Image (cartoon, rainbow, N blue to C red):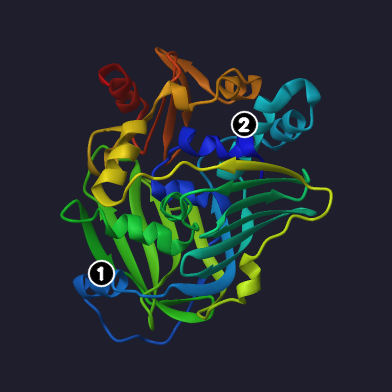
Amino acid sequence: MTRRWTKWVPALAIPAVVIVGAVMVPLQAGAAGDLPDKTPQQLLEFAASSKVDALSGTLEQTSNLGLPDLSSITSSMSGSGASGASGEDVSQALDLVTGSHTARVFIDGSDARMQVMDQLAERDIVASPDGVWFYDSDKQSAVHLTGSAQKKAADLTAPTPQTIANSVLGKIGDTARVTVGKDGSVAGRPAYKLVVTPKDADTLIGFISLSIDADTGLALAAQVNAKGSSDPAFKLAFTQVTLAAPDASLFDFTPPAGTDVTEKALPASGGSGEHAKGERAAGIATVGTGWSTVAVVPAAQVPADVLSSPMLKSVTTAVTGGRLISTALVNVLIADDGRVLVGSVTPDRLLAAAAGS
């Protein structure tokens, strides 16, 4: 994983229910014995009270966002010297949002490690209070981030079904209808199914299904369906999970000999709670509320070479005021002034947000 790839994170500030799919695969839920009945409110409270903070397992993710097959384009762009760094950036970003991925994840409190398994290669993210490593075996490169452990914990949460669940549970209120689906089994563990259907008429999200571990309340799987579609646009699930602390040595990372290492210091977060939220908000603004919120990334945070990438132009459509990446679940507007607007809303809503923000 290259330093340039990390710059795409703010530029692709897709709502949490989508961006965490950048590294994971299909929901595998089987039959399970009949579990004790729970009302929607009881299941919500059970899931919200989950205290699992140590685990290891295998995650799988698939995305079916309605984008065309870009494999031939991304492979040629990422392998072409003429495309430059920006072509590689866009290639990697598109691969993450359109492809399927398998990853191993290890979590123990504030320590986390994720190994994304590519064909004949591996990408590692290792986070601890001492810093964060991004390692790409294919490129033989690594980036070592040091600085505020608090910033690391806030910004680099390991993407798991629980990450999605936390985001969803935190915004339900009276904005969604909550029901209990059919019991099932995920990664060999019996699980309840919590179905959240947004009431917002303007969002592209049809419903979100969370598989909740019957013993611990941990989210074992998450699925997001676009409105009007019976097929999921995004799936993320454990295929194997162990609810115990991993070996501590997994969080001690040393780059292999010959790795090109870049050291980069993270600035101090400058506070926590509402103060930290205010600092983050100063960077990425929002328009609207709830499920149809639009994130507005300032032009200064979007790499200029990425915006000028021939690949980006090849996968976007020209619209009044910019270029559009349109999918079943999320739309992205690259405005003419360099801003990037992202939301689970229609292109018209993005254009209106761009004009009014």
* Amino acid type, residue under disc 2 in the picture: Val
Determine which residue is flagged by label 1.
Answer: 44
User: How far is the residue under mark 2 from the one under mark 1?
Assistant: 38 Å
Percent position of residue 265, x then y: 55, 42
Q: Residue at coordinates 29% horizontally, 69% vertically from top-left?
A: 48
- For the residue labelled by badge 2, is the local secondary structure a helix, a strand or a loop? helix
Q: Taking 174 as reference, is 213 left or right?
A: right
Q: Can residue 27 be seen in this view?
A: no
Q: Residue at coordinates 44% horizontally, 47% vertically from top-left?
A: 18
Percent position of residue 348, x then y: 32, 24
Contact? badges 2 and 1 (CB < 8 Å): no
Percent position of residue 70, x then y: 65, 35
**Of residues 171 and 300, the one drawn nearer to the viewer in this rendering:** 300
- The N terminus lies in quadrant: top right
Q: Furthest-left residue in view? A: 174
Q: Taking 1 as reference, is 208 left or right?
A: left
* Residue 81 to residue 65: above or below: above
Q: Which mark is residue 90?
A: 2
Percent position of residue 327, x then y: 47, 36
Report crowding for label 1: few under 14, some 14 to 19, many 20 or more residues within 10 A (C-alpha). Answer: some
* Residue 271 to residue 349: above or below: below
Quarter occupied by residue 328: top left
- The C terminus lies in quadrant: top left
* Amino acid type, residue under disc 1 in the picture: Leu
